[in-house]
Image (tube, grey):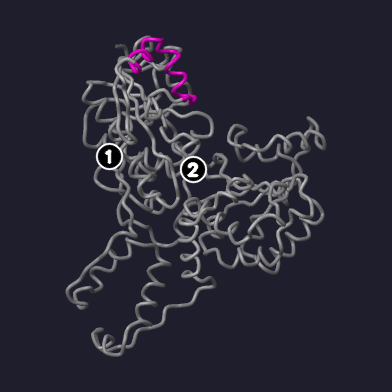
Amino acid sequence: MRAPANAGGEPLARWSESEPAPLTDYADRAPPLHAYPVFPYDDQINERLAIWQGDISTLEVDAITNSTDETLLECNVISERILQCAGPDLKEEIITRGLECRTGEVVVTSGFDLRCRHIIHTVCPKYVAKYHTAAESSLHNCYKNVLHAAREAGAKSLALCLVSAPRKNFPPDVAAHVALRTVRRFLEQHARPRLVALCARGAELGPLRALAPLYFPRGAREADAARWRLREPGGADGEPAHPERRIRIIRNPHEHSAAHAEDDTSLCDEDAAVEAAAAFARACSPDTQLLLPGNAPAQPAPRRHYDTDQYERLLRRARSEDLSEVSGIGCLYQSGVDRLGRPVVVFIGKWFPISDIDLDKALLYLIKLLDPIVRGDYVIAYFHTLAASNNHPPFSWLKEVYTVLPYKYKKNLKAFYIVHPTFWTKMMTWWFTTFMAPAIKAKVHTLPGVEYLYSVMARDQLEVPAFVTEYDMTINGLHYFQPDTNST
């Protein structure tokens, strides 16, 4: 087998050869989540990783991955392409031998007419928010078993597709975290395969490239910057670790001193730690208070301008309730990343039916979608295209949404773009950001056309309904004026 190459015979570019992205200055922010880099800079490991966009069936490697179903004959973009290029012998072997594969497991077959020696088939779980921990663990098993199967088969190079296809409903950022974390831990522990090429198509590539520096830093600065962004480093093999399931037991409250404070607060974020301490102090009886050092009364935690307990209750409801009637509308979704690697959330105003939607469930769905995204920087693009008065959300509901969302939503929001605004939109935006939400006033920008978004994000990263682009062509045509840099 020759060196790993694409269809044109060019060698795959290694991650170590890519240019580091611009780094965010965290000097004026909260303390880092980790005292030291969880995934230190290692150029030898970066040399063994490639991130490649294209058709996985065209790669000349020792083994490729096929994301399929239990029958190994699922009709999806990757599986259909592999079955077609491998020739009829692959399908005949699957049917003749009665091959099947359970979720999270793998089956290895010959590569037949492909440029690889082995095809490693795996079955990705379906993501359901209520059972997200099981889905993430099963997805981790997919990647781990594929990597071990390639190693056992003697493969020196492996093309690993993102097995969490959109039809499985996995949030793109969650799926990318699981894939990158599992691959990093595997490469740390094993010398084979010598190269793992993560293959993505279309919008899947954005989150992968944006999050890769957290697990594969290309220098000491990227490794240090990851201490602020990487919330959950996972287990020894890259398996998801869920802090909410951890229970710390101490024998004596005096042993639970300041020496353990740093370790304890690493299990939850700063806000949750403060609120938990306050709740504990309020719940303690007078006798329990005597156990505290020096008999000193507990100091009340500072009150914040939002209710953390209320948000946590809403988040638990969002993860457990059936929100399919809201998610099925399709008015709110993530669409790739901008040029700085920040996730872009798209909101289609015309598809927000105020009279036919349960606004309480709409709030829950908003929290469910955004909670994993707003842990880092993000951008919102609101399209007011052809929105009518029955699409305008009540002002009382907007006020409730802004009040209940924690500070991280406002802090990490880097831009809020309003495309195709009307006079009503501009007046409401001015009033709301002036009197209700001055913290985000400077982040709100009105854009007369879709074309202006392409200065901050690539065209292939933005997915909008056809009526938006058709309307945009009607009012703007092919010629766009430069946006006002003072307002945008």
> Element under label 1?
helix
Query: In the rendered image, which quarter is residue 243 located in?
Result: bottom left
* Coordinates of residue 284 in the picture (x, y in percent): 32, 83
- Range drawn in magenta: 75-95
Residue that label 1 marks:
185
Residue depicted at 33% across the width and 44% down the height: 137
Residue depicted at 29% across the width and 43% down the height: 238
Q: Are marks 2 and 1 in contact (CB under 8 Å)?
A: no
Residue kind at label 2, given as amino acid type: Pro
Marks 2 and 1, how far apart at CA: 25 Å
Residue that label 2 marks:
22
Seen in the image, is 396 located left or right of residue 460?
right
For marks 2 and 1 on the same chain, the one whose residue lies earlier in the sequence: 2
228 vs 77, nearest the viewer: 77
Seen in the image, is 307 located left or right of residue 471?
left
**Quarter placement of the N terminus:** top left
* Coordinates of residue 464 in the picture (x, y in percent): 65, 38
